[in-house]
Image: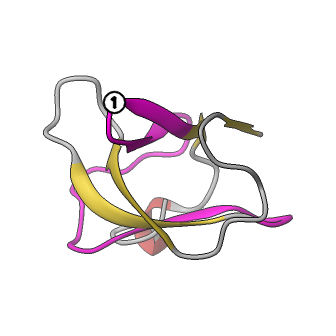
Amino acid sequence: EVVWGALDYTCVGVRVDAKIRYNMAPQRARLYGGVSPRLVFDEPVRAVTPGQMAVAYRGMSVAAGGVIVDDAREMSQVA
């Protein structure tokens, strides 16, 4: 389940900075809403694991966040 903050579920390909671990540097990505929200990183992100949180930011605001549920092999670029 995604919790929407500064954006809503209708967003399509919105540029965000995203993190999958609290101590990682934010990475550029695109956020897609809808019934199956996706976070697509510009560059592969290492060790994406189902059960982790993914958080997308727009500036200093949280755009959206949620638990990663997809298979990690498909998520080197999609969370």
Return the x and y of residue 46 as percentages of the image width and height.
Answer: 21, 56
Q: Quadrant of the N terminus?
A: top right
Q: Nearer the viewer, residue 49 or 34?
A: 34
58 in the magenta segment: yes
Give the residue furthest to the top. Answer: 22
SS for dot 1: loop
Q: How many marks?
A: 1
Give the residue furthest to the left. Answer: 25
Residue where numbered disc 1 is placed: 60
Residue 50 is at least partly visible in this image: yes
The segment highlighted magenta reads 34-63
Protein image colouring: secondary structure
Q: Quadrant of residue 60?
A: top left
Residue displayed at 55% across by 62% down: 71
Return the x and y of residue 37 as percentages of the image width and height.
Answer: 69, 61
Return the x and y of residue 13 as percentages of the image width and height.
Answer: 54, 76
Residue displayed at 57% across by 46% down: 68
The amino acid type found where label 1 is placed reads Met
Relative to 74, residue 6 above or below: above
Q: Nearer the viewer, residue 33 or 60?
A: 60
Residue displayed at 27% across by 50% down: 47
Label 1, residues with CA under 10 Å away: few <14, some 14-19, many ≥20? few
Relative to 38, residue 74 above or below: below
Left-right relation of 28 to 34: left
Q: Nearer the viewer, residue 36 or 74?
A: 36
Residue 53 is at least partly visible in this image: no
Give the residue furthest to the right. Answer: 35
Left-right relation of 6 to 78: right
55 in the magenta segment: yes
Relative to 40, residue 3 above or below: above
